[in-house]
Image (spheres, rainbow, N blue to C red):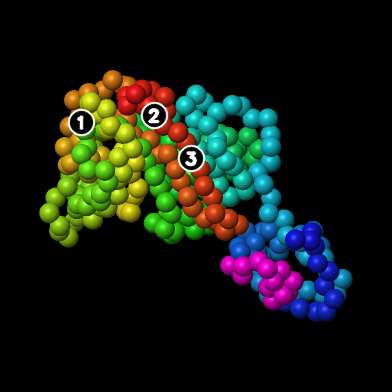
């Protein structure tokens, strides 16, 4: 795509963009405009009806996050990807996504806030989804509220894959787990008969490996209910190793054996298909070797 176009006749900005970037999706062009990526004579313009005159130069600049020498992320957190719209983070077990009501505990949110404010004290991050404190793996944050809203509105369409090591041997090779959850209590979610205060939870599973005592299972979420994987596996009679709240009796890794391993989603600014993958942490892999 050429760096810029020169206006030859009076026009409004949005129709000009459609005409001069014909191979680009119109929704993407509108996002360029909305989030300040369209420059007219090197000035960001967001009005779709901005009047253009002959000689104006139009450029598209989707800026990537600046590279700066910032303090390293704390142990247990690693930035996998960062650009002008999102941060994809690897969160270690033991880190909260955001502070509890008590305000206590290390949070990925506060660490990333410090990170983005290294370049500008006005910067901040927005939470798109969460991982439990003792769950490791991939988590996405947005760098503006509009990007957060786009991601959350479409989150149910994206693919989220987890790996878990559970107690006992699951005999079925694959299947779908369904139940209705009562999320009234903050510490423990319960599966209950359907009712006005319940929400259906659906998880698809596939066994990857069996040992004499444990099973490594891949889980794909169809719904995103709180603790749904933990409840489903407990209801199967195979609680996640280390998950004492849901019936586990073993804890050899001294952590919950649940890991958010893959994310597939559409980038909120560029509409590019994004894919991220993290292997099972070594401490959990040892449980099935």
Seen in the image, is 119 located left or right of residue 147? right
Q: Quadrant of residue 154?
A: bottom left
Q: Residue at x 32, y 53 (%)?
A: 223
Q: Tell me the element at label 1.
A: loop
Q: Residues within 10 Å of mark 1 (few under 14, many from 20)?
A: some
The N terminus: image quadrant: bottom right
Which numbered dot is residue 168? Answer: 1
- Say left or right for 286 vs 202: right
Residue lying farthest to the right in this orientation: 55
The residue shown at (65%, 61%) is 32
> Residue 230: which quarter of the image?
top left
Rounded to the nearest angstrom, the CA distance separating label 2 from label 1 is: 23 Å
Q: How many numbered callouts?
A: 3
Give the residue at x 82% y 72%.
Answer: 7
Query: Of residues 88 and 74, which is closer to you in this image?
Result: 88
Q: Nearer the viewer, mark 2 or mark 1?
A: 1
Q: Whole-Å distance between the Cαs marked 3 and 2?
A: 17 Å
Q: Nearer the viewer, residue 136 or 72?
A: 136
Magenta region, residue range = 14-27
Q: Nearer the viewer, residue 153 or 119?
A: 153
Which of label 3 and label 2 is nearer to you?
A: 3
In the picture, residue 167 is in which quadrant?
top left
Residue 267, position as x, y percentages in the image: 55, 54
Majority SS type along the magenta span: helix
Q: Which residue is mark 2?
A: 93
Q: Quadrant of the C terminus?
A: top left
- Counting from the top left corner in percent of width and height, residue 153 is at 43, 59
Q: Position of residue 159 (x, y in %)?
A: 42, 51
Q: Is residue 265 left or right of residue 11?
A: left
């Amino acid at each position: 795509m050429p760096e810029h176009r020169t206006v030859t006749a009076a026009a409004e900005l949005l129709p000009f963009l459609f005409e001069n970037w014909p191979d680009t999706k119109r929704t993407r062009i509108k996002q360029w405009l909305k989030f300040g990526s369209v420059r007219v004579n090197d000035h960001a313009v967001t009005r779709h009806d901005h009047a253009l005159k002959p000689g104006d130069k139009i450029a598209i600049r989707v800026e990537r996050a600046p590279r700066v020498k910032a303090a390293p992320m704390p142990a247990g957190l690693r930035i996998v990807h960062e650009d002008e719209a999102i941060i994809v983070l690897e969160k270690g077990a033991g880190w909260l996504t955001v502070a509890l009501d008590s305000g206590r505990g290390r949070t990925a949110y506060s660490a990333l806030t410090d990170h983005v404010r290294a370049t500008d004290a006005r910067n901040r991050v927005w939470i798109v989804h969460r991982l439990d404190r003792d769950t490791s793996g991939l988590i996405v944050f947005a760098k503006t509220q509009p990007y957060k809203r786009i991601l959350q509105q479409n989150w149910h369409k994206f693919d989220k894959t987890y790996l878990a090591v559970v107690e006992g041997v699951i005999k079925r090779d694959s299947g779908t787990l369904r139940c209705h959850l009562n999320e009234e209590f903050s510490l423990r979610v319960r599966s209950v008969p359907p009712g006005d205060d319940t929400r259906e939870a659906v998880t698809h599973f596939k066994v990857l490996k069996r040992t004499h005592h444990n099973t490594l299972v891949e889980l794909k979420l169809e719904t995103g209910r709180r603790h749904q994987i933990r409840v489903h596996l407990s209801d199967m009679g195979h609680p996640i190793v280390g998950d004492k709240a849901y019936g586990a009796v073993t804890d050899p890794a001294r952590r919950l054996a649940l890991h958010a391993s893959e994310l597939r989603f559409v980038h909120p600014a560029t509409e590019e298909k994004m894919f991220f993958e993290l292997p099972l942490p070594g401490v959990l892999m040892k449980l099935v070797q």
